[in-house]
Amino acid sequence: MSPRKFQAIKGTRDILPAEISGWHRIEAAARELFPRYGYREIRTPVFEETELFARGIGAETDIVSKEMYTFEDQGGSSLTLRPEATAGIVRAVIEHNLAADDPAPKFWALGPMFRRERPQKGRYRQFHQVDVEAFGMSRPSIDAEIVEVALAYLEACGLRDCELVLNSTGDAKCRPAYVETLRAALRKEAGRLCADCQRRTETNPLRVLDCKVPEDQPVIDGLPRIGDHLCAECRDHFAEVRRELDLLGIRYRLDHRLVRGLDYYTRTTFEVTSGALGAQNSVLGGGRYDGLVKELGGPDLTGIGFALGMERLVMLLPQAEDEGRCDVFLAPLVPDALDPALLLQRDLRRAGLRVLMENEGRGLKSQMKKADKLRARFVAIRGEDERAKDIWMVRDMAGSVQEEVKAGDVARHLEAKLRG
Ligand code: HAM
């Protein structure tokens, strides 16, 4: 019996060489763009103490209550694969005192996140985020900047046709009263709500606003709106954010239901969506989280940021042209040609060219087929005749012309052809 074959775990996927160029493109755009705004890269571990996420994201959120990959390690600690990047970055900022003497504590990160959601198009159990966070800045101008850098990033990656959705969710001063108003309204409608929303009415009424159950929508549409219950400071803050977005020429749609699936948000929340994604239409989401650093044991420091789903962004971008992967293919046809081929291969690679050669000693026809499949620009052949004359036969695969080149000149010749 042949051994059992393995498959990737449900909800995870291999990013294959044929699709890697899209990933490289968006990673390079991040490295190039974020430093222009003063963001520096940070890399935090993929697992943390479970309690960090429970306290940071909120025990009643779907992420914490249903979706975390939590395990006990051999030492008995409860650990969790990070479902998002913000809590870990906040932990690092506190642990290393990163905001203490940095006049602009701004960080960006990218990497894998883990949520045990039901897999579907654009939704995976291991997925990747690009994440941006800024600390200690409480004025509306940083809210506007965060939105602006998010959109500039999408544009740098080549994304068009997306929509910015914006809301303010109030703060510790005005939200508790709104939540009570919401709860009272929900209790009156309990009989018309799904079981989850009936539970949320008591545990975390804001989460009802995220509910996607069609039968619940008429009730939810009639609920009191956060915008009508903001305190004066939150209302002024939001008005100024919008004024600055207008100033910067950034268009948005207001959505009073945009409370987002994590509990740490205060004031500004936003998402960028794309119709081309289908049901999972959010490309990125973020907002302000002014109480989180303190909640996680740090100083009273404000925070704001966003995260983008890399799988979703790559899906939305046009596939890059396959450029081929070989500038020069070396075809040594006789045993004596092996050593010159090895030396030539090394020299060409040192000069920065992409070189492959025949290692299995096959005949000319099969070598040419291989060069074709690799989309080689040039093939350099050395058989009996070429050995006798101490030359290489260099074939230009585009024009199917070939010329004899002295062995000592062949590296320079190919370099000039490919760079010229
Ligand atoms: P989030 O809305 O949970 O926010 O996730 C941000 C983005 O990650 C989503 O818009 C989506 O593109 C992507 N995403 C989330 N879950 C999945 C999944 N299962 N499969 C594929 N992509 C997914 C956060 O994570 C916050 N930490 C954002 C933030 C940063 N807020 C402030 N700072």
Image (spheres, grey):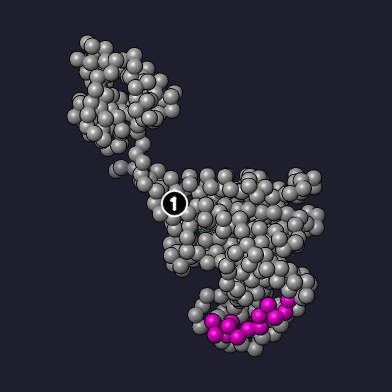
Which quarter of the rendering shows the N terminus? top left
Instruction: Tell me the residue at 78%/71% (across/down).
Output: 233
Q: Which residues are magenta?
A: 216-230
Name the quadrant where ligand 1 sits: bottom right
Q: Position of residue 76 (x, y in %)?
A: 66, 49
In the shown orientation, is residue 395 left or right of residue 114?
A: left
Quadrant into which the C terminus falls: top left
Q: In this rendering, does residue 280 appear at all? A: no
Residue 402: % across, % down: 23, 26
Which quarter of the picture shows residue 176? bottom right
Q: From the viewer's side, name the closer residue of 175 and 95.
A: 175
Q: Nearer the viewer, residue 269 or 146?
A: 146
Q: Inspect the magenta stretch and tell me whether residue 219 lies in it.
A: yes
Report the side of 101 relative to 403 (left or right): right
Residue at the spot x=31%, y=15% of the render? 407
Instruction: Give the residue at x 54% y 82%.
Output: 217
Q: Tag 1, which secondary structure?
A: loop
Q: Which residue is mark 1?
A: 13
Residue 207 on the magenta segment: no
Magenta-drawn stretch, dominant element (helix, strand or loop): helix
Q: Nearer the viewer, residue 110 or 399?
A: 399
Counting other residues with Cα less than 10 Å from the Cα at mark 1, is it few (<14), some (14-19), or many (20 or more)? Answer: few
Left or right of 142, for residue 333 = left
Work out whether residue 104 or residue 182 is closer to the camera in this orientation and state it: 104
> What number of labels is visible?
1
Label 1 sits on what residue type? Answer: Arg
